[in-house]
Every structure is written in C-alpha cells, then in structure tokens.
Image (tube, helix red, strand yellow):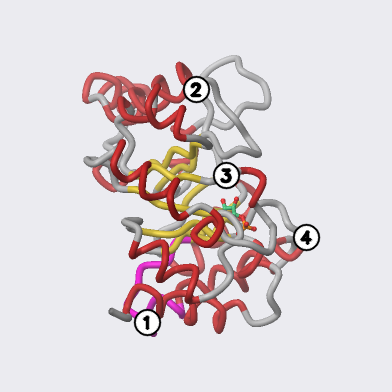
Amino acid sequence: MIWVNFKIYKETFGDGALFLAEACYRAAQKSGIKIIPIVSPFDLVAIKEKFQKEVWLQHGDVFFEGAKTGWLSPLQAILKGADGFLLNHSEHKLPPGKISQVLAYLKRKSWQKKWEALVGKKLPWDKVATMVCFRSQGQARKWVRRLDADWIAYEPPELIGGDVSVSKAQPGVIQRIVSILPKKKIVVGAGIKNVEDVKMAVKLGAKGILVSSAVVKSSRPEKVLLQLAEGFLEK
Ligand code: G3P
C-alpha cells in the first residue's frame, strides 16, 4: 500500500490537491495497489465530493467537540468524510499519552457510542483507520508496541525530503523494528523515490510506504506512483 502525504506543499494549493488526489486514484486503479492521499482539512471535502474514495487527514487532535479553539476535531473530520488519520508525524508531534487518547476515542465502543449520541447519527467506525508515526527503535520499544493503531510508520526525520531513502540508509534498523514489533503492520517513509526503495522496504518486512516530495513535487505524479507501485508487484 502507498500513502501519499500532501503536507502543505504549494503544489497542493488551489486545484493542486485535486490533481494529486486524481493521480493517486488513477495510479491505484491501473496498478491494483491501494494508494491513499493524506490531505489538509482545507482539501478533504472537495476531494471526497469529487472522487468518493478513501482520503485521510494529516493530523487529528485529542479534542472531539466543545470550546477548543483552533483544534482539529477527528469527529468533525469523520462527519466530513475523513477515512483515516495520520498521527504524530515528526512535523506535527503529539505526546504518547495524547496519541493513546485519540486512538481510544476513535476505537473504543463506549466512546464511539458517546460521539454518535452527541451528533445524533451512526458513524462508520469500522472504516476509520489510523496510522501513528514514530522515529526510533527506542520509541518502538517504549510505547509504539502498546498502541492500538491500524498501522505504524517508521520515519527517521533526518531523511525526510532528502535524497537517500530510509530503505537504503537504514535497512538494519527497519529489520530490527520489524522484529521488535512482530504483530504490527509496519509502514516506512522518508526519502522514498523509486521502485528500488520500495522493493527494499517490502523485502525488509514493510507492508507499505509513506511518501511525499517525490510524488507531490513531481510534474507527473501518476507516473511516479505507478513506478513506486511496481515495487509491490515484483517478486
Ligand atoms: O510522511 C511522509 C514524509 O514525511 C516523507 O517525506 O518527502 O521524504 O517522501 P518525503
């Protein structure tokens, strides 16, 4: 699987986010590999309305409703069509306690019932996915193993947006993370640019990749995605 983090790159402004989302969905359809755009709240509704396909937000806060100025309510996002949340990206960190709290609010039946009562309607909880990012083997050992997230993503911050991918720079670390977290669905990201990076990540045990600049900043994002998708198809 491929997640494309749009961040707030200028390429996503205006109709850019729609153009990129279309590239994701078209490449997914052509390759048979699931590709999910992770977008800004400004673009989520337009993308959902136009394509009616899976789309995630880049963040979600611990506040779901109430007198909380400027926070990003996951409950409001779900009502607007968000299918998932990226949490604790190294560019938008949350303390571990807050991550667990957001996950509990999204995943525990008692909370789900509470939110449904609050908004007066049933919500598609089984379709709401979560991915928590982390940055080190230490974090993997300390708190990531206890998290109830659908996916966890290893991204070393120093490689984000750079020329060398996490798969090439840190194959040993990826392998150790896979062995520290045998029951988790692990995604890797940072510096991923080509099919070789993807193949290596998959060989090391990753179930997916998280990518941004190589796709968002390309003038031909669909083509880049089709090449990245090849990495999941080749044996
Ligand atoms: O969330 C994905 C991101 O941080 C990786 O960025 O530009 O290195 O693909 P990039």
Q: Residue at coordinates 53% horizontally, 20% vertically from top-left? A: 95
Q: Which residue is mark 3?
A: 156
Asked if 200 appears above or below 207 in the picture, the reply is below
Q: Which residue is mark 4?
A: 10
Residue in the picture at 39% in, 23% down: 143
Nearer to me, 35 or 66: 35
Q: What residue did someone put label 1 on?
A: 31
Disc 4 secondary structure class: helix
User: Which residue is at the front of the view, 17 or 99?
Assistant: 99
Query: Which amino acid type corresponds to the residue marked 1 in the rendered image?
Result: Ser
What's the amino acid at mark 2?
Val
Could you say which is closer to the camera, residue 124 or residue 62?
Answer: 62
Q: Name the residue located 32 percent from the left edge and 81 percent from the top edge.
A: 234
Quadrant in which the C terminus appears: bottom left
**Percent from the top left, x then y, of residue 215?**
61, 70
Question: Quick one: label 2 or label 1, which is nearer the N terminus?
Answer: 1
Element at label 2: loop
For marks 1 and 3 on the same chain, the one whose residue lies earlier in the sequence? 1
Name which quarter of the figure residue 113 lies in: top left
Q: Earlier in the sequence, mark 4 or mark 2?
A: 4
**Spatial CA span between label 4 and label 2:** 28 Å
Residue at x-position 46% and y-position 80%: 26
Asked if residue 48 can be seen in this view, the reply is no
